[in-house]
Image: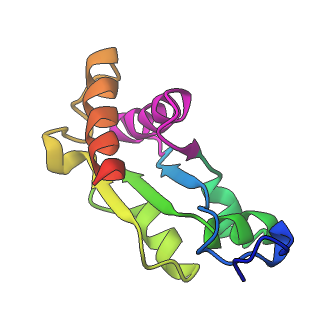
Amino acid sequence: MSDSSSSPTSCSCSCSSGPKLIFGCSGAADVGAIADRAARKLSQEGVGKMFCLAGIGGRVSGIMLTTQSAEKILAIDGCALDCVKHCLQEAGFKEFKHLRLTDIGMEKGKTPVSDENIAKAAEQGKQLMQA
């Protein structure tokens, strides 16, 4: 419903936009740490809201509902294992942007967790969210 008498809870996606959510890898590898920090940076910059991937894995109802209402979703994986991508897909989410840091030249086990690398990852994520 999109008429002005509708309550916000009965309003469909046509009358309001959902949140822009960012899910980042937080794995033990350097690229996992960069993915996590890039997701946090994007959240701090207002590109989207970093959200809880563990809640997706655990199928926590509130987190699932919020994610279902998302206007855009960005998944940031550190490496080719694609844990973030797979978690979202296993939970039934198919429409999202995906950034894998090894695809932008970061090598697992050999990439320092530096401000420069975090900024590079965040910039790629920002571009995906704006596309």
Which quarter of the figure has residue 108? Answer: top left
Is residue 76 shown in magenta?
Answer: no
**Is residue 42 part of the magenta span, yes or no?**
yes
Q: Identify the residue at horizontal 66%, vertical 58% (top origin).
A: 54
Q: Main secondary structure of the magenta part?
A: helix
Is residue 19 something one can see in this rendering?
A: yes
Q: Residue 87: horizontal and vertical position, in percent?
A: 52, 70
**Residue at x 26%, y 45% (from the top left corner):** 101
- Bounds of the magenta segment: 27-49
Give the residue at the far top of this rendering: 115
Tell me the quarter of the image containing the N terminus: bottom right
Rendered view: 121 above or below 12: above
Q: Quadrant of residue 12?
A: bottom right
Left or right of 127, for residue 1:
right
The answer to whether 23 is drawn above or below residue 3 in the figure is above
Residue visible at 61% across and 74% down?
13
33 w.r.t. 100: above or below: above
Q: Is 78 left, or right, of 71 in this rendering?
A: left
Place of residue 75 in the rendered image (x, y in percent of width and height, measured from the top left): 42, 57
Q: Position of residue 27 (x, y in %)?
A: 47, 46
Against 9, residue 20 (above or below) is above
Q: Residue furthest left?
A: 105
Determine the residue positioned at 55% across, 53% down. 21
83 vs 8, left or right, is left
Q: Which quadrant of the figure contains the C terminus? A: bottom left
Could one spot residue 58 in this view of the protein? no
Residue 52 is situated, as x and y percent measured from the top left of the image, at 65, 52
15 or 61: nearer the viewer = 15
Model colouring: rainbow
